Structures are given as C-alpha cells and as structure tokens.
Amino acid sequence: MFGQTKTHNDENIKGWLFFAPFAILAAVFFFIPLIGSLLLSFREYSLLDGSPFTAGRWIGIQNYVTAFTDPTFLKALGNTCLYTVITVPAKLIIALGLALVCNAKIVKAKGFFRTVYYLPTITSSVAISIIFLYLFKADGLINMVLSKFGIAEIAWFYEPKFALPIIMVMATWAAVGFYMVIFLAGLQSIDPTLYEAAQIDGASEWRQFLNVTLPCLKPTIFFNLVVAMIGSFNIFDFAYIISGGNGGPADSTMTIVLYLYQNGFSYLKMGYASSIAFILFAIILALTFVQKQFFKEEE
Amino acid sequence: MQRMLIIGAVLAVAMMVFLSGLGTEIGGNKETKLYIGCWSASPVETDLINRQIALFEKAHPGVKVKLETVTGSYDTYIQTNIAAGTEPDVFYLEPQETYVYASRGLVLPLDKYIPKEIIDDFYPNLLAAFSYDGHVYGLPKDFNPLIMYYNKEMFKTAGIVQFPKTWTELLAACEKLKQAGATGALGDSFRKPMIVDSFVYPYIVQAGGQVYDEQANKLVFNSPESLAGFKFFYETLFRDKKYAAEAKTLGSSGGIGALVEKKTAIVCSGGWSMTGLQRMAPDWDYGTAVLPAGKQMGGIMFTTAYAIGKNSKHPELAAELIRTLTGPECEKMTAAVGLAVPPLKSLEHFYRTTYPRSAPLVEMTPYCITNTFGKKARLVMNEIDKVTGKFVAAPEADIALAVNQAYETIKKADAGDKEYNW
Amino acid sequence: MNRRDSAIRKNFVRVCFYILISAYALIALFPFVWAFITSLKPTADANNFSIPLDKLSFTNYIYIMKEFPYLRWFANSLAISLGITVGSIIINSFAGYALARMNFKGRKTMFWLVLAMMMVPGQVLLVPQYVILANLGWVNTYQGLVVPALFSCFGTFMMRQFFLSVPRSLEEAAMIDGAGRFTIFWKIVFPLAKPAVAAQFILTFVGVWNDFLWPSLIAKRQEMYTLTVGLNSFYSQYTQYWDQIQAGVMLISIPAIAIFIIFQKQFVEGMTMGAVKE
C-alpha cells in the first residue's frame, strides 16, 4: 500500500518534470501574452508608454467598437476575406486536380513532379515576393509578354485594382504544392478494393470519383480546408513585402495581420492592435467550428 | 539519434555564443561604438554619409560609428527599439514625428548639448519642425523643396522665353508647348499612377489655404481655400488630359528621364533630381525655376533631422557627432553631392554662387511648409495620402467629398484625445 | 469497343495527363529558372529578356558575399534554425511522452489545453510577446529569437500520438529490469520515434529558416539578421540591381531546397502524418 502511494507520487512528480519545460515556456510565451493581449484590448496603450500596460487607460469595449467603424480595418477585413474566398478554393482545386492526375496509374515519375510542385512551398515568402516583383515590374517579363498581345504596360503593384490579385496569384502559386502533397497522400491511402468493387458495379470513372474518391478524401479535404483557411486569414508576409509595409496602394493590400502589426508597432496603438487580434481569433474559431459541423453532419 | 540531437543542440548554442562574441572581440573592447539609425538610401547617399562619418572618426580617435540601415517601416524600427532600450544613439527624425518622440521624452533636447549660436545658424522654419515646448530635438541634416525642372530646347521651340511665374501663365505655356509638338507638358509628379502624395501640399498653400493652422491648433485642409488647391491639383492638372502626359508616353524611365527624352517639358521634383540628370545627361543644359504662384507663392520642403535617443549611453559624444554631421564641412559635402540643400544660413551665399542652378531651391525656402501638422501629423498625412489613392483608383471621384472624408476620419480618431481644436 | 480503341484512348489520356502536369511543372519552375538566369547576368542586361550566354557568370554571388555579411546571416539562420528545431523536438517529445504515458495530476486538463492552444493563431500573441521580450532585454539577442519558439503544440500533439502507438509491453519489460522512467523514455521509447522526429525536424527547420515576421521584429542590428530579413533589407537597398537581388534570392533558397530534396521522404511523411490520420 505504502509502496504504491510512493510510486504514484513519484510518477506524479516525474510526469510534471517531463512536462515542465513545455509548461513553463507555454506559460511565459503563450498564456501570459494571451491574457495580456486580452486585457490590453480593453485599454489604451502604446509601446512607448513604458510603464506596465496595466497603467494604460481602461476604455472598455471601445477598441472593438472602433474596429467596426474604422474604414481601414473594414477594408483590411474585406481584403482578407476576398483573399480567402478566392485563394482557398483556387489552391485546393488546383492541388486536388494535380494530385488526381499524378495519382493516376498511367503516370510515372510521380516523385519528380511532387518535388517540382513542392519547390515554391519551401521557398521563403521573401524570396517569392522578390521573384514576383521582378516578373511583374513595369518593364518586366509579364508586361513584355502582354505587350505582344497589344496590352499596354500595367503598373501592377501601383494600381489598387491589380496589387491584391497579384498577391493572390503569388500565394496560390506558392501553396499549391503543399496541399497537393497532402491530397496525394490521402489518395494513396484509399483502399484500392473500393475501386475494384465500383468497377464491378460498372461505375464510370466520374461516378467512382464522386462515390469513392471524394467520400474517402473527406478528412484530407477537411484538414486542407482548415489549414488553408487559417493560413489565409493570417496572411502577412506577402502583403508586407509587396507593399513595403504600408498596405498600399490605397490600402488595397492591407490585411488584418498587417493592420494589427501597423497599429501595434507603428501607430502606437497596442490596445487597438490587441482587439484586432481577438477579432481575428474569433473569426478563425468560428470558421473552424462551422467547418467541423459541416463535415460532421454529412458523415 | 539522441546523440545527434544533443550534438545539434550543443552546436547551435556554441554557434550563437561564438557569433555574439564576434562583434565585441574585434575592437578589443576599447572602442566606443556609436550607432546611427537611418533608412535605406541610394548608394550615392550612403557613400556621402560614410565620408561624413569618416570625418568625425578622424577627429575622435577611439570612436567607431556604425550606420544601421533600416528597411521596411522606419517608425516601427525606432519605436520597437526604444521600447526595448536598444535604439541607435543617433537616428533620423522626421517633422511629423517630433511631437510623438519629444512629448514622451524619448529623444534628448539638443540645446542642452549644443551651443545656441550653432543652433541659430539653421533656417528657422526648418528648426521649428523639430522643436517642441521651447526645445530643439533634432538638427536638420539637409532639406529639399520642390521646384520645377524644364527642357529649355522645348521651351525655345514653343517660343517661351522665360519660365512662367504664375500658374495661369504656365497653363498657357503648356498649350503652346503642345502646339509645338510636346506629347504632354507636365510630367512625373502629375501623371498616373505615380502621383507622389505630398506633392499636393504646395497647391494648397498656393491657393491661400493651409493644412494645419498652428496658432489655432486646427486642421484646415478642408477649408474652401485649401479645397481649391486640391481641386487645382487633381482636377485641372491631373484629370484634365490637356496638360499632364499619359503614363504610357512617358515610358518606363519616367520621372526626370522623360525630360531628357523630350517626352515631357516640365517636371516637378526636389533637388535630388539634379544628380539623376547629371548621370543621365552629363552636359545637358536644362532649366530650373521656383514653383509658379497661384494666389500666392507656396511650396513644401522635405527635411530630416538627427536626434539622440534617450537610452543612448554616450549622449555628449552623440551630440558631438550631430554637430559634425550638420557642421559646415559636412554640409559642403552634402551640397557637392547635390542630393539636398545645406540647412545652414551661413552657407547660403556659398551654395548659391557655387551651384547657380540650385538657386531656386534656396529661393523656395521662405514659402515652404514642412510636414508639421500638429500632434497627429502622421495620421493627417496618411489620410491625405488616401485622397490620392481614391483619386487614382477613380479619377472621376469627387475631390471635395474625399477630402472631407479624410477630415472626418481624423476627427473621429481624435475623439478621445482632443489633440486638435475642432 | 475493341481492344485497339481502348488502347488508343488510354494513350490519349496518358498524353493529356502528361501535358497537364508538365504544364504545371513549368509554371512552378519557371519563376525560379528566370530568377536564376537573371542572377547570372551582368546588371546592364538584367532588365531585358536576352540571355547573353557569353556574359553569364557567378560574379553577382561573389559580390553579395563580399558586400554583405551574407555568411553571418547564413550562420545566424543556421544556428537559430538548428537551435529551435533540436530544442523543440526534445521539449515536445518529453511533454508528448508525459501526456501519452505518465500518470500525473492534471494530465487530461493539460492535454486539452495543448489542443486548445493549437487553435490560437500566433499573431494574436505578437504584441504582448514583444513587450515581454523588451522587458527581459532579449530584443536583438539570440535567446530572443530562439527561446519563445522552443515549444510547439502541434509537435507535442504529434509526439503524443506517436508514443500512444508504442506497445506498452516494451516499457513494462524495462520497468521489471528496474529501469527508471527517464531511462525508459530516453533509451527505449524515444529511439522508436525516429520517423516522427525526422518529420518534425524538417518541418520545423524549414519553417524557421523561412520565417520573416518574428526575426524582422527581434533582429535589430545587421549582425543579428537572419537570411530572410537580410534579403529583404538587401532588396530595399538595391532596388534597381535585379541581377544581384536574384543572386540573393538564390542564395537563400538553395539551402532550403537542398534540405528538402535530401529529406524529401521524411518531409512528406511528416506532413501527411497529421492530415491523413485525423
């Protein structure tokens, strides 16, 4: 009896010892910032105020109210939503298409194509932005090709109507490989007997896709959808580098995280930045939840 | 595998220890290091400041000055650094930031370290841009008013003898230039989509308006006079295709290059364009002139100052560095490079006689405002920038409406702070 | 339908498929190829579309190495990526094992906390994290770049899932032999996690190597820059010198691409581990 309590205690202590490094780091760099961020979002505080942020003026939900009447934030929210609505399906559909083709039995050298498609994904966003800035510059390759079709030179990154779409193209190009590899793995894990059974039933290839592939791929699609969605809402690097940090021209490349960053570190409004952070968090949480419900219901 | 991981960890830590030690070892720890924070500039400008620094280092053995070039948002860099106590000893300060830093005591008052007679040699309207509460927080390193550049040959062909003194005359001249075959008279700063935002300010002043009324602490950029300035700039000069050259006729060299290539006859720009012209067409004879007057003379000048961060460990030495960098010897080097004008009154005569073509820059000075728009100057500038954005996106936009929207946005943002009188 | 028809049809489909995936491969590769070619050109030719074969050289690469502390940035990136990767693997593995196998008080709560933490986007914490680092005096230091990233909820979760799949009998046998918990974990269970560790290693390493937001906030002085921050800074200063900029792009991309090609198998396994099983 005594011995048992001892080993039990021992196990308890050792368990915590194993878990401690993680717990301490998470406390200092996750929970304290999280609570701090929440408290900050109800205050007025700037990075330059020095004193602990609890000295900032308490202004209740004012920051949240401001956000929803702030045209720049609304523009950033709109841009981010538009970016998500367009790039998420684009990334997933292209990725799924490529994965299906690559997975076909008649295609050889799958590994080669997988590697090539994956290259943009492991390249840093800074490098990708610079490569695209070069391709799309005023006297760059894209304009040269377009001029062959009689299209006049376009200042891609200076015109509000083009800047965001280019970022979308760039982001899609950079991400397709990632989702493609995951789709490919999902496809390869589908039990081949299911297809055999379908073939015996005389199902066409389209039918097989609808009745076997898609249902089996559901968890993979869900995973990709969640990852793509969260990634899209958090877009920062491309917008920051392409616009030189200001979200221009005319806020056309302003995103939620870029605006958060500007408010926190440049406009001296850390409280406001924190409230933007929590609005972003709420949106992501809600979307994930809705998706989960949606996928559950169908099962 | 465990061994590999542990070796990896040890290797990483060893590398970091070695790398962080690398900087301090070299100087034998005896050198005093001073950092200067600046934004990225052209190689020519970097070369200039390096030569100026060399001058200081020569006079102060044992002191090493390091240039810290900031890329991305400069404000973010300075603010996040100040919060962490790691800002450079000396850094660039812009007029619109003076209040933000000075009122919080984040930059040191320079009049404590530098004698009054030295400070008094700077142009007063430049010093005012860096003053707060009776103290000077930054000494201007140089400045740059906007002036006009024009192609003399094209003017001659069109039969125009002298550069017009007023906008009425200038617009008439544009007609003549066009008849003489110029594709567009006004280039660069007037063309889509490269309108530089702050280029609208001169027109506001010329129309008898102001952006900010300092006495009353009021923003007045939507007053009828100021609006007339906005309208003239956006509607007459830009929207009306009669005067401004189309982007495509200017080609990709754009800007000042279009002047050389005769694609445009007139370009509005700062002193920096002279070095560009020098490079593109070394012996070319072009004309420079002060901005024409509207109701009155008016212009904008851009300026940057050196300030000392509050966490600097060597404020006296930093002040000494600023004194050298803005002293006559260094300012003569600035003038020689030609990117900007020396801010010292005592150098005015020298500058005008040595660089006659730059004379309009100095002549513009008394009529110029700086980006000094009260306590939320940056917000004001951002909002006025957005007017440009809206107009570029839809040239048919109602300018008065856009300007008033900008005004309301600032008013709303100020609701809790009451930093302006409304 | 006879056999020949079906064979023709099959060949036709095959050709179509190859055209399709080759076309996309071209799209994926072309920007790199173009950037690489540009990096070999002299500045005078960087803005035109010719490829002057006789003038191509690696001069730009040498220039960057000389003019910029590229090697320092490379060393910084390497040290930080390695430090974070190794450190977080060890920390996550211990935590994951504790969650999978050790009976400590509050284990369930901790597990749910880890799951909940995965839902919070890192950007939410950006502002206060910086304030904390500023107060610790860790801005512009290696510890500031490394320590906050030394734990990962996803990594811990992944390791826990892996350790759950290790048969208990192995541990029980060792316990009878009198081995302590630490020995059991470190000597017996942990080595089995090689695939999971390898996958995490590459995912984390490439992630940190390419990270931009955090180092751009923390690395204030040139000598502390990582490659991504350095490249962005280089780009902003050399806006017109596209040949040199593209050489910089190549110099930062090649190490990540090399690592990927060498460890491709583990990489793909690691990525799919979370996705397909869930």
Image (cartoon, coloured by chain):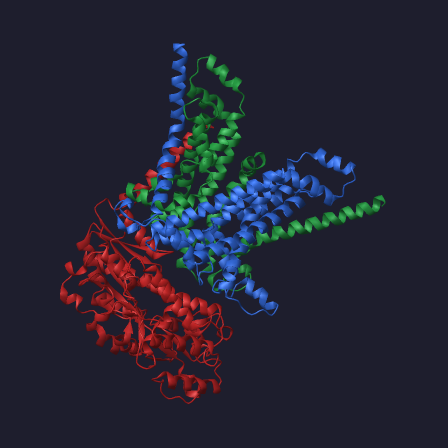
Q: Can you say which quadrant of the picture contains the N terminus of chain A?
A: top left
Locate residue A229, reporting x and y percent.
52, 47
Callout count: 0
Left or right of C91 on screen, residue A82: right
Left or right of B394 on screen, residue B81: left
Q: In the image, what residue occupies the spot 70% across and 40% down?
A: A211
Q: Which colour denotes chain A? A: blue
Locate residue B204, reporting x and y percent.
34, 75
Locate residue C4, reporting x and y percent.
84, 46
Locate residue C181, reporting x and y percent.
43, 19
Q: Is residue C200 above or below residue B101?
A: above
Q: Is residue A281 above or below residue A17?
A: below
Single out the residue that lies furthest toward the top: A1
Q: Which colour denotes chain C? A: green
Left or right of C116 on screen, residue B49: left
**Residue C267 vs residue A263, the one in the foreground:** A263
Single out the residue that lies furthest toward the right: C2
Can residue C218 be seen here? The reply is no
The red chain is B
Q: In the image, what residue occupies the spot 43% across and 43% down?
A: C122
Q: Is residue A218 above or below residue B75?
A: above
Q: Can you say which quadrant of the picture contains the C terminus of chain A?
A: top right
The quadrant holding residue C239 is: bottom left
Can residue A115 be seen here? The reply is yes
Q: In the image, what residue occupies the spot 41% across and 86% down?
A: B172
**Residue B132 vs residue B226, the one in the foreground:** B226
